Image (cartoon, rainbow, N blue to C red):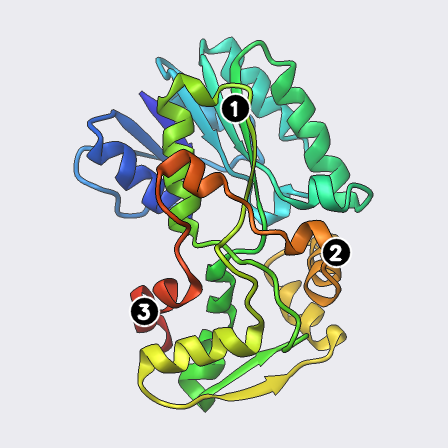
Amino acid sequence: MIVVTGATGNVGGPLTRTLAGAGEQVTAVSRSAAPVSDGVRHLAADLAEPAGLEPALAGAKALFLLLSGDLHGPGTGPAELIARAGAAGVRRVVLLSTQGVATRPFGATRIAMRALEDVVRESGMEWTVLRPGGFASNALWWAGSIRAQRAVAAPFGDVGVPVIDPVDIAEVAAACLLEDRHVGGVYELTGPEVITPRRQARAIADALGSPLRFQDLTRDEAKAAMTHSMPAELAEDTLDILGAPNEAELRVSPVVQDVLGRPARPFADWATRNVGAFR
């Protein structure tokens, strides 16, 4: 059995479906009840209370660990989740980390995540660490303004990074959970090209078949919106990257191609599949 945390989100949802489609027994963990694929067991648990995960870990062979935004900050204690997994006999763990651990190692949230990576490495379990850059699905932040005003509101409209489709992350994660060749890997994941928010807005407009207006936000305006769903430190760290990506953050990674044998999906593909969110 494989345990998937964050199982109803942008990565956990497709990962759960991919594993179930491969014939694996899967326990999907999320904070609240949610529909899952046929044959998948669901457990409602809050990772902020690690003891609640124990019913899922019993008899599990592998764990995919994805932390919600509020667990990325210092002092949140997710290392206990790793200890409980090892004690339960879990043999393999795949951790969803962040590219910033390597590209900007001194931010508070990255220091905390690097410490968790170290816990995973020293756990005695087989491990793989995934370090994605920006997610294509972050464009869902614009859904409300697109539906209401036919406008995209974002900072740094002409500064791009190679955002990755969460389905690509999920499929790489599935390979790491199922294939021995990825044990001990630290994989940086990006999309196939650098794309700016303004170009992302055009891709969504193309998928909708109607024009959108681009509205520039200041950094402070963007931070105020982001802190509704993540700690202020994580918002600051994210805005640092979006506003002034460094050379490493602009580099397109070959990992999706290497692991899956196909190119990473472009943003336009994500926009077409998710166009219903913007109607």
For the residues labelled 3 and 1, the Cα–Cα distance comes to 40 Å
**Residue at left offset 55%, top offset 67%:** 195
**Is residue 131 among the parts visible in the rendering?**
yes
* Residue linked to disc 3: 272
Q: Quadrant of residue 208?
A: bottom left
CB under 8 Å between callouts 2 and 1?
no
SS at mark 1? Answer: helix
Q: CA distance from mark 3 to mark 2?
A: 29 Å
* Residue 180 position in % (x across, y down): 41, 17
In the rendered image, the quadrant that contains the N terminus is: top left
Q: Position of residue 165 (x, y in %)?
A: 43, 54
Which of the two discs, 3 and 2, labels the residue nearer the N terminus? 2
Residue type for callout 3: Thr
Q: Please tell me which residue is depicted at 41% across the width and 37% down the height of the picture.
A: 172
Check residue 157 in the rendering and tell me which mark sits there, or answer none.
Answer: none
**Camera-nearest label, 3 or 2:** 2
- Going 63% across and 41% down the picture, which residue do you hit? 71
171 and 264: which one is in front?
Answer: 264
- Tell me if residue 36 comes above or below residue 156 in the rendering: above
Amino acid type indicated by mark 1:
Ala
Q: Which residue is mark 1?
A: 51
